């Protein structure tokens, strides 16, 4: 394997600074026309558009693309990936729009398919790409249902990229969206590798163009967070040249923006008579499934599994002593469909010939299994189909959590019986490694960053309760001293209290509401509270960043004075702003009438006042995100603070009052000859200075003097050429890195993965991040090999060749 652009990248590394080299590597992901590159799951989503537009140009079509949606893990980094390579993508005709929420983004994509029906169209076709996590799909169902009936551009098409979080790693609830997409009549492709993300995306656009339907791409967390080498180029995908015909003529879908009767009736008829059959025809005509193992009458047992689950199954089989080369001899046949709705019935029937029993393996739902049973039922010699349960009603697969290779071993062992080639004792020993006693594992709880405004803003007066919601402030639910209760979907903040308030003794509730959520849909929750005449104080936490998904600015973001005007226009009459710096607002700032701006030290007093106010009141807590402030300081966009704080251990009594008032992780205890004392971890401290408000005389402030620094040109270090090679250089292996968010775990994994890729090796990696940027558990998996392997990108129990531990927990 020769990585694309490797020689040019090597010269860049020798001749320029690290930042230029980093940008060059990003550019290679989208500038390389064909070859092997290394990229992340979010990069692969963007690469679909690059290769599709390149293919269109090679076929004489002038096309462009629009990408829009709403950030949320596991797809929280799509917009960040775009911005890093914005110039290259715009030059390729790929544009990005920051949308206020998911359903408006879906409606925007609907418009791209209508653009070529207008007289002044600039392109032969426009591709739309919508992205969002599972809850975003749920709220966008109305828009997508309308847009799907309206039709897609035969030279454009729509890809609906949905982020599923089956393990509920960074979501309120676990998710699987294939049934929701099927209900919207959106065909669903399910990739299980970075290579398949790119390839299936290309097939998705071709399917959308051929059928007139939106097409779904299911991206689970392990794909979005993955990093691997993949082949790219417009030549990779070959679409069948034949066309679906209606009455002997090629089918061309109707596109209409007049969704009213009788037009709606005609579109519905076309939808069912032609569009879905056109999709099924396309799926059957193109190589959208793979079979592995026994191909003749020797096949006895069959397994149907798609996407990520296929790679977990192959690794589990390997653990059971059955490698890919052993499948045929063991009489096992595996069917891997790329499209999980609607399934290719013809391919499935061919796969099932001669097989006596089929195990359908899928997470959460039984959608694939129900299609398999329906497709095979008319067969006279149909095989027995099992899935969630076996033929006797015994559980084979859980309906909850996610697949891993380890979790599939018991069910595969039960299904395969005597075909398993390792001893029961060996399996038991292996499974015991993957299931350590819960009591033996300390829990690393996600927490606010040092200096995070939520450390102060989420506190409530004694006797009060604050409702939870979506955003970093959700972590208050892990902190009993914050008196936060409950959670709701994005934009529902406060509405639970509306329903409960009539039936409880307490008459007031505080409700936390992030500024990103406010712009997304939370403003409607305030309007609902006003219409419902309840006593509630919304605490609008204005951090000026969507910190949980990368620190982006919320689409449609308003300044604090502008928000007060909006709230006043909605009918809120009691609005108070609490700020870390009351003098930061322009003198001519246009505030709503009677708005007060108070010091953050008065937060408790302000809240005590507002909870006595009848009706709806709003407290805007204005302080920038600590993580974003730190980044801006490092990049020279904000001045470094001159004042630092330290603790005089001779005076400190170790009482912890500074921790109580600041809720800050940079304060920690140390044992000294004078007893247990408090210290400040200066490297993580974001100089919020809240800790100084504790009742303690031991704090010392140090003010740095202004010094003019001489600007010198950067020193370009030459690579040493006489470095001795190590005695042993591993050619392949598996590396596991674990630690806390913010300690560089992911960075180290990316460096190792990129180095291995540049060395000509195959790379498969997975970054499992915590729910917060600091304090949450973070783990990274890296597999390096000389040849590609069909296996999971997770490292199983006891399989790591090396471990890098960044934290003792």
Image (cartoon, rainbow, N blue to C red):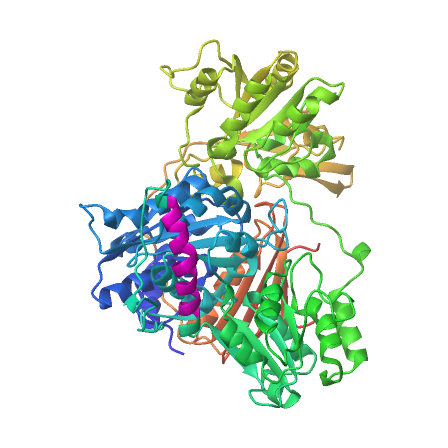
Q: Quadrant of the N terminus?
A: bottom left
| Percent position of residue 433, x then y | 75, 68
| Percent position of residue 167, x then y | 64, 55
- Residue at image position (44%, 50%) is 131
In screen coordinates, is 358 left or right of 516? right
| Percent position of residue 199, x then y | 41, 68
Magenta includes 276?
A: yes
Magenta includes 102?
A: no
Along the line of sight, the residue nearer the viewer: 632 or 75? 75
Along the line of sight, the residue nearer the viewer: 489 or 296? 296
Q: Quadrant of the C terminus?
A: bottom right
Query: Is residue 594 placed above or below 219 in the rendered structure?
Result: above
Examine the image and state in which quarter residue 494 appears: top right
User: Which SS does the magenta portion mostly show?
Assistant: helix
Bounds of the magenta segment: 264-283
Outermost left residue = 120
Along the line of sight, the residue nearer the viewer: 270 or 599? 270
- Residue at image position (70%, 55%) is 808
Query: Is residue 65 placed above or below 666 in the rendered structure?
Result: below
Residue 499 in view in this figure:
yes
Examine the image and state in which quarter residue 694 appears: top right
């Amino acid at each position: 394997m020769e990585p694309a652009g490797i020689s040019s990248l090597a010269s860049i590394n020798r001749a320029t600074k690290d930042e230029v080299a980093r940008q060059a590597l990003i550019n290679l992901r989208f500038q390389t026309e064909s070859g092997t590159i290394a990229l992340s799951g979010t990069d692969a989503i963007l690469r679909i558009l690059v290769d599709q537009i390149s293919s269109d140009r090679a076929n004489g079509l002038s096309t462009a693309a629009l990408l829009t949606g709403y950030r949320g893990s596991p797809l929280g980094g799509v917009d960040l990936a775009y911005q890093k390579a914005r110039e290259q993508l715009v030059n390729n005709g790929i544009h990005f729009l920051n949308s206020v929420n998911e359903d408006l983004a879906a409606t925007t994509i609907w418009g791209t398919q209508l653009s070529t029906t207008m007289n002044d169209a600039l392109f032969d076709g426009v591709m739309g790409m919508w992205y969002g996590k599972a809850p975003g799909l749920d709220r966008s169902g109305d828009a997508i249902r309308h847009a799907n009936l309206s039709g897609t551009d035969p030279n454009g098409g729509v890809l609906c990229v949905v982020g599923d979080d089956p393990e509920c790693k960074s979501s309120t609830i676990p998710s699987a969206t294939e049934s929701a997409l099927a209900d919207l009549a959106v065909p669903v492709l399910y990739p299980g590798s970075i290579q398949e993300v790119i390839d299936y995306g290309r097939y998705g656009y071709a399917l959308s163009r051929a059928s007139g339907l939106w097409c779904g791409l299911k991206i689970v967390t392990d794909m979005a967070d993955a990093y691997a080498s993949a082949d790219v180029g417009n030549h990779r995908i070959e679409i069948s040249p034949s066309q679906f015909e209606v009455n002997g003529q090629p089918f061309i879908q109707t596109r209409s923006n007049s969704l009213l009767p009788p037009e709606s009736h005609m579109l519905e008829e076309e939808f069912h008579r032609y569009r879905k059959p056109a999709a099924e025809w396309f799926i059957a005509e193109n190589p959208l499934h793979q079979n592995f193992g026994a191909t003749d009458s020797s096949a006895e047992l069959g397994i149907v599994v798609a996407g990520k689950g296929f790679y977990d199954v192959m690794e589990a089989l390997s653990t059971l002593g059955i490698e890919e080369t052993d499948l045929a001899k063991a009489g096992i046949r595996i069917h891997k469909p790329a499209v999980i709705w609607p399934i290719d019935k013809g391919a499935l029937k061919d796969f099932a010939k001669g097989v006596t029993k089929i195990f359908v393996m899928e997470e959460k739902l039984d959608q694939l299994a129900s299609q398999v049973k329906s497709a095979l039922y008319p067969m006279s010699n149909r095989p027995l189909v099992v899935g969630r349960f076996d033929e006797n009603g015994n559980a084979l697969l859980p309906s909850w959590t996610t697949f891993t290779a380890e979790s599939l071993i018991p069910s595969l062992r039960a299904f395969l019986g005597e075909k398993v080639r390792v001893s029961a004792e060996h399996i038991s020993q292996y499974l015991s490694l993957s299931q350590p006693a819960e009591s033996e594992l300390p829990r690393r709880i996600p927490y606010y960053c040092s200096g995070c405004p939520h450390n102060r803003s989420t506190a409530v007066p004694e006797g009060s309760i604050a409702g939870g919601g979506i955003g970093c402030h959700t972590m208050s639910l892990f902190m009993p001293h914050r008196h936060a209760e409950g959670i709701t979907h994005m934009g529902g903040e406060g509405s639970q209290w509306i329903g409960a308030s009539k039936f409880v003794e307490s008459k007031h509730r505080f409700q936390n509401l992030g500024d990103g959520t406010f712009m997304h849909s939370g403003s409607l929750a305030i309007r609902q509270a006003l219409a419902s005449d309840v006593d509630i104080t919304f605490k609008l936490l204005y951090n000026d960043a969507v910190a949980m998904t990368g620190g982006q600015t919320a689409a449609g973001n308003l300044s604090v004075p502008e928000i007060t005007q909006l709230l006043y226009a909605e009918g809120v009459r009691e609005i108070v702003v609490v700020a870390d710096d009351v003098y930061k607002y322009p003198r001519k700032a246009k505030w709503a009438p009677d708005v007060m701006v108070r010091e953050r030290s008065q937060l408790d007093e302000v809240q005590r006042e507002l909870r006595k106010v009848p009706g709806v009141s709003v407290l805007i807590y204005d302080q920038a995100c600590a993580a974003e402030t730190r980044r801006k300081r490092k990049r020279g966009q904000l001045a470094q603070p001159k004042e630092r704080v330290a603790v005089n251990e001779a005076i400190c009594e170790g009482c912890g009052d500074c921790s109580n008032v600041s809720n800050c992780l940079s304060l920690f205890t140390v044992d000294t000859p004078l007893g247990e004392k408090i210290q400040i971890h200066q490297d993580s401290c974001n100089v919020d200075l809240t800790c100084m408000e504790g009742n303690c005389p031991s704090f010392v402030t140090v003010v740095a003097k202004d010094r003019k620094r001489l600007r010198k040109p950067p020193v370009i270090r030459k690579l040493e050429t006489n470095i001795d090679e190590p005695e042993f250089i591993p050619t392949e292996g598996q590396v596991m890195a674990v630690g806390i968010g913010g300690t560089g775990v992911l960075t180290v994994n990316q460096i190792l993965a990129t180095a291995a890729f540049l060395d000509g090796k195959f790379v498969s990696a997975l970054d499992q991040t915590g729910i917060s940027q600091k304090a949450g558990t973070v783990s990274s998996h890296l597999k390096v090999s000389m040849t590609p392997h069909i296996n999971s990108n997770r490292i199983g129990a006891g399989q790591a060749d090396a471990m890098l531990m960044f934290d003792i927990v």
